[in-house]
Image (tube, grey):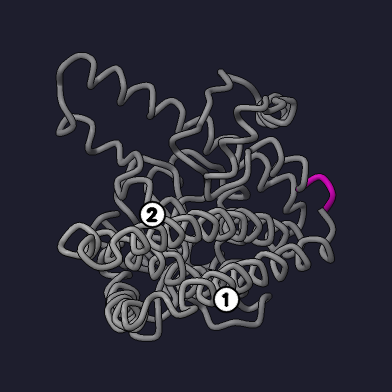
Amino acid sequence: MSNFRLKAGMLGSVALIVGITTLGAAILLNGVLGLHFVWTLIFVIPFFFIQWYFGPRIVEYSMKVREAPEDEYPNLHRRVGELSRRAGIDKPKVMISDLDMPNAFAYGNFSTGKKVAVTRGLLETLEDEEIEAVLGHELGHVVHNDAEVMMLLSILPAIFMMLGRTLLWSSFLGGRRRNGGALIVVALGAMFFYFLLNLAILWFSRLREYYADQFSAESIYEGSRKLQEGLAKIENRMAQLKERQTKTRRAGAGASSSGNMGLNPLGSGMKALFIADPDTASYSGQLSDREMVNKYKKQEPGLGQRLFELFTTHPELSKRLKALDSYR
């Protein structure tokens, strides 16, 4: 994927989101809603600001994140410092997550500062050069500020969802005596725009992963190869953890026994924090680094997988690996 196509796609996705929002608001405000829309805005926007403000603390609690002491993780600090200087940004705070799942993520806001976290599982799974490439990917998110854009965009479908629910309750609790039928129609319309906006935002989320991959590939010597091998190993290890967790649950040990694996601890609503989707990971077997990359690259998603990708935050792995070939 060329740099021009990638940037155009990201701008196009944002334009589509704004267009859907404008169209939906115009239709629903056209003499139908009265003050319903205003009260929804008054409720939803402060709620999301609070969520955004406390979000980093929630992430750290859920993902068992703490600051990584420089004397314990000198290589990690050195890599982040070098990549930050190369990118022309201040060095983010370096964090460590005590989870077995191989993962890395960038987060933070004006109150906490920018932060980059890696899990214990990532450090145990990848080689140093692959960790460097993964850190480059996460710093790409920091440079692009796409986490902040995602947060702002996520407010828009929530407005329509809350509006739809409010109107449905209004129609059930007395609205039928007046214009309950019209309220139900408008509520369903609001939920329809909520669905469309979610699809558009997921498209933006997948594009930002390609964009961060590109940043890593172009910022690091042999970055494409290093990131390909890192992504393949992460996918393979996630699939192993998923299978182990499934077997443990089937054996009747319960979630408490598998909690230390750290597989998707935040649930599907926070998948944007993952470098790869833990729920769709597939096992490649015990192969060499390049054999593993080539095996994943050759996987052609079927129609069902292509349709399912529309509802995911991350691109299908084979597409990411093939896209990285173009940056060699």
Which tag is nearer the camera, tag 1 or tag 2?
1
Q: Eyeballing the image, is 157 above or below 313?
A: below
Q: How many marks?
A: 2
Q: Residue at x 76, y 48 (%)?
A: 324
Q: Residues within 10 Å of mark 1 (few under 14, many from 20)?
A: few
Is residue 112 in view? no
First in residue order: circle 1 vs circle 2? 1
Where's residue 289, x and y in %? Answer: 66, 31
Which residue position is annotated with label 2?
270
Q: Eyeballing the image, is 274 above or below 72?
A: above
Choose between 35 and 21: the one closer to the eye.
Answer: 35
User: Magenta part of the protein: which range?
Assistant: 324-328
Where's residue 251, x and y in %? Answer: 20, 14
Checking the image for residue 22, the label placed there is: 1
* Horizontal arrangement in the rendering, residue 209 relative to residue 311 (left or right): right
Identify the element where label 1 is drawn.
Answer: helix
Q: Main secondary structure of the magenta part?
A: loop
Query: Which amino acid is tagged 1?
Result: Thr
Give the CA distance from mark 1 to mark 2. Answer: 26 Å
Is residue 159 in view? yes
Where's residue 168, x and y in %? Answer: 28, 59
Where's residue 216, x and y in %? Answer: 68, 60
